[in-house]
């Protein structure tokens, strides 16, 4: 049975319903991950869980040690990764509360440790990243979203910005011209590091606000937190359905 790891984002720093068997403090060549890797039983199967921003939520997107997180999950035995990400909606279909399982990503982040292939190397490696997300995992997520009667899009282009600030209206207009549908701050380098470790990876994105300029007002943390609180039960139901299948 595939060992799935869930990387929980904002709003998902712990996984209720996980019957804990171990909290692993894993040291990696890249430093410490955001939190202990939790191992336990969820929806009838062994799973791993890692809070991307730590628990409690304290590490901003640009300071997450993505390399340590991915390395630790691999070390703990992960064979596939389901990442949960809160995002802003750019495409008109991506209203608050809508889910997206992106099929593509554009990386606008900078200055992050974004590869395991650095330092003293025997040879240079260029991983293929034509299709950043694993199709089988994507299909599992979309099937679960449908079964849970969630509003979702089975495709979308994820724009990964640097944060921690939100974007300007002009920046969102540019992302839209680039073909982006949703915007978040944590999709990269997580996706490519998973690829470098040969871990199939897919993203379950929950829209928690219209991106800058996509609503009449400004974006408030209160609206984001409300949308997270409203959407998390659906996120958990979707994950349970994928893992229980
Ligand atoms: N922009 C970037 N990241 C985000 C947003 C946003 O509007 N909402 C949630 N994460």
Image (tube, grey):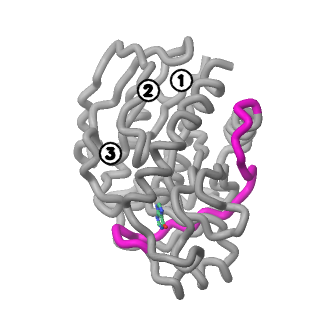
Q: Are marks 2 and 1 in contact (CB under 8 Å)?
A: yes
- Marks 2 and 3: which is nearer the front? 2
- Point out residue 61 in the picture as x, y percentages from the top left corner: 35, 59
Crowding at label 2, few (<14), some or many (≥20) Cα neighbours within 10 Å? Answer: many
Residue at 41%, 34% (x, y): give it: 73
In front: 21, or 214?
Answer: 214
- 207 and 220: which one is in front? 220
Viewer-proximal residue, 26 or 218? 218
- Decide: is 5 above or below 126: above
Helix, strand, or loop for circle 2? strand
Image spot of residue 120 (x, y percent): 32, 58
Q: Is 225 part of what is drawn in magenta?
A: no
- Quickly name the residue at label 2: 48
Cα–Cα span, label 2 and label 3:
15 Å
Q: Is residue 162 magenta?
A: yes
User: Are discs 2 and 3 less than 8 Å apart at CB?
Assistant: no
Residue 28 visible somewhere in the drawing: no
| Closer to the camera in the image, 125 or 187 | 187
Secondary structure beneath disc 3?
helix
- In the picture of the structure, the residue carrying the numbered disc 3 is 68
- Per the image, the residue denoted by label 1 is 3
Q: Quadrant of residue 145?
A: top right
Q: CA distance from mark 3 to mark 1?
A: 19 Å
Dot 2 or dot 3: first in sequence order is 2
Residue found at x 59% / y 29%: 237
Query: Which quadrant of the rendered structure holds the C terminus?
Result: top right
Q: Earlier in the sequence, mark 2 or mark 1?
A: 1
User: Which residues, given as a range, are shown in magenta?
Assistant: 147-166
Q: Is residue 36 left or right of residue 121?
A: left
- Residue at screen point 53% across, 34% down: 233
Q: CB atoms at circles 3 and 1 under 8 Å apart?
A: no
Quarter of the image for residue 241 reads top right
């Amino acid at each position: 049975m595939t060992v799935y790891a869930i990387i929980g984002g904002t709003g998902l720093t712990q996984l209720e319903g996980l019957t804990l068997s171990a909290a692993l403090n894993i040291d990696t060549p890249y430093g410490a991950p955001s939190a202990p890797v939790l191992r336990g039983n969820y929806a009838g199967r062994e799973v791993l869980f890692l809070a991307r921003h730590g628990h409690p939520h304290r590490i901003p997107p640009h300071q997450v040690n993505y390399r340590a997180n991915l390395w630790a999950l691999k070390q703990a035995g992960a064979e596939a990764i389901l990442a949960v990400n809160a995002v802003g909606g750019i495409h008109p279909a991506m209203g608050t509360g809508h889910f997206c399982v992106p099929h593509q990503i554009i990386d606008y982040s900078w200055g992050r440790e974004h590869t395991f292939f650095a330092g003293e190397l025997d040879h240079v490696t260029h991983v293929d990243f034509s299709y950043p997300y694993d199709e089988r995992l994507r299909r599992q997520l979309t099937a679960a979203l449908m079964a849970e009667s969630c509003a979702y899009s089975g495709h979308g282009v994820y724009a990964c910005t640097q944060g921690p600030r939100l974007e300007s209206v002009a920046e969102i207009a540019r992302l839209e011209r680039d073909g982006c549908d949703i915007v978040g701050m944590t999709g990269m380098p997580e996706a490519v590091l998973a690829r470098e470790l040969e871990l199939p990876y897919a993203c379950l994105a929950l829209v928690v606000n219209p991106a800058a300029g996509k609503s009449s007002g400004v974006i408030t943390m209160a609206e984001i937190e409300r949308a997270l609180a409203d959407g998390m039960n659906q996120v958990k139901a979707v994950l349970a359905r994928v893992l229980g299948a």
